[in-house]
Image (spheres, coloured by chain):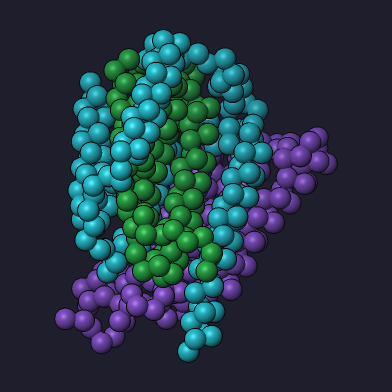
Amino acid sequence: MKNPEPGMTLIVKTITRLTVGLILLYGIYIVLHGHLTPGGGFAGGVIIALSFIHLMLAFGKETALKKLSEARASLIESLGAIMFLSIGVLGIAGGYFLFNFFVDKGRPFHLFSAGTIPFCNIAISLKVGAGLFIIFAALIIFRSLGSEE
Amino acid sequence: MELNLLLLFMIFSAIVAVQIEDLLSSVIAVGAVGLGLSLAFLVLKAPDLAITQLVVEILCLIILIRATIKKDLPFSTSGRWVFNTMSTVVFVVMFLLFAFFALRELPRFGAPIMRVAQEYIATGLQKTGAANLVSSVILDFRAYDTLGEATVLFTAVIGVLAVIRKVGRINNEKS
Amino acid sequence: MSEYILCFVLFCIGLYCVLRKRNIIKIIIGLGIIEYAVNLFFILLGYRAQGRAPVLAKDQAVTNIVDPLPQALVLTAIVIGLAVTALIVAIAIRIYDKYGTFDITKIRRLKG
């Protein structure tokens, strides 16, 4: 009982259309509030990668790769690494490498506070999310012959 | 008390995962061990780790199931030969010996020696302005470790692409 | 004290699985169990009885917090463990394509 079209059954596709946007939004929320509530860059990055993987599992490879191609994911991953390194190099102006160089740390327990920590969280989440998506796409796309009809 | 029950559940699921013959069932049992670990992190007052362990466990299960589906062969779980049994016993006994010596030096459970962390807790909010102390530790006091972790992740991505991409090339050459 | 002993028993179960099984996927499962046991041991060392989570709130005094340093180390260790597992699974898929089996006693030749 295999479907002639790629992906899973109709029930899975309908539920995916409803929930994949909410998963992405939840991941972005955990990344941005990383300095106030538990979470941070690593957990948020994995959740963002999981939303794209959910799209790929439910609809097949072609549809998901149209939303986020491999070349663009590789660009986003390198962008995250360059952002993290440039924040570190800019800290040399204040003292040492990776120094939190914002003089005014803002009021605590508010969203705009804690110096360079929110920007570092965003950079780490871009790197982790795009990297895990590339790993999963490579394991699924280059399936060998003899194991897929 | 709840922690001991959770650890017993994890040990039971690990024994099931190791001994069962069907590959798909043992992968699902490893998922149960990971879920128990996430609950244990919550009982030990570490909410960051509970969130991260849960989502990482889901991704690990997806990758393992995609690797084993349509590929499980009936295999026998009998051991290899006598030399293997002897070396296994030697390794496990050596590990238990070192664990016994280590257990006598450990502090009592619930009273940690916090020599470095006292300063991080006392001056964390005032020096960095972040309310989450674990975030201020990994991104301000110890940011080098985060840079090292980003490098390891990058190396793993390059490694997976280098190992897998050869299959595509050989397929193109043959056909 | 009993928590440490149960954690070592979990490590021994993973060690037995790595040493005695013939299937590559079983060996990967054993490595995963070893990694769970080591992460759990780190966090057990830093627990303070009747402590609070290391997230400060607006109107509570800063007292009696569990150790935040092992939690920061284990946070990166969990994500690195996932990347290493993905790499081993990719190598296992490649081995299956070349030899047609997951049985390690039949994978003998190192070249060719």
Q: Position of residue A52 (x, y in %)?
A: 42, 66
Q: Residue C97: which quarter of the image?
A: bottom left
Residue at horizontal 21%, vertical 81%? Answer: A2
Is any part of residue B158 visible from this angle?
yes
Is any part of residue C40 visible from this angle?
no
Q: Is residue A125 depicted above or below B116 in this figure?
A: below
Name the residue nearer the viewer: A125 or A101.
A125
Q: Is residue A11 depicted above or below A4 in this figure?
A: above
Residue that lies at the very extreme toward the right in this rendered image:
A93
Q: Colour of chain B?
A: cyan
User: Which quadrant would the N terminus of chain A be assigned to in this image?
Assistant: bottom left
Residue at horizontal 23%, vertical 83%? Answer: A3
Residue at horizontal 50%, vertical 28%? Answer: C70
Residue at horizontal 60%, vertical 55%? Answer: B155
Q: Position of residue A69 (x, y in %)?
A: 52, 75
User: Which quadrant would the C terminus of chain A be assigned to in this image?
Assistant: bottom left
Q: Position of residue C2 (x, y in %)?
A: 29, 18
How many labels sit on residues? 0
Q: Is residue C18 left or right of residue B19?
A: right
Q: Is residue A8 depicted above or below A41 in this figure?
A: below
Q: Colour of chain C?
A: green
Name the residue nearer the viewer: C83 or B129.
C83
Q: Which chain is purple?
A: A
Q: Is residue B18 left or right of residue C54?
A: left
Q: Is residue C59 left or right of residue A75?
A: left
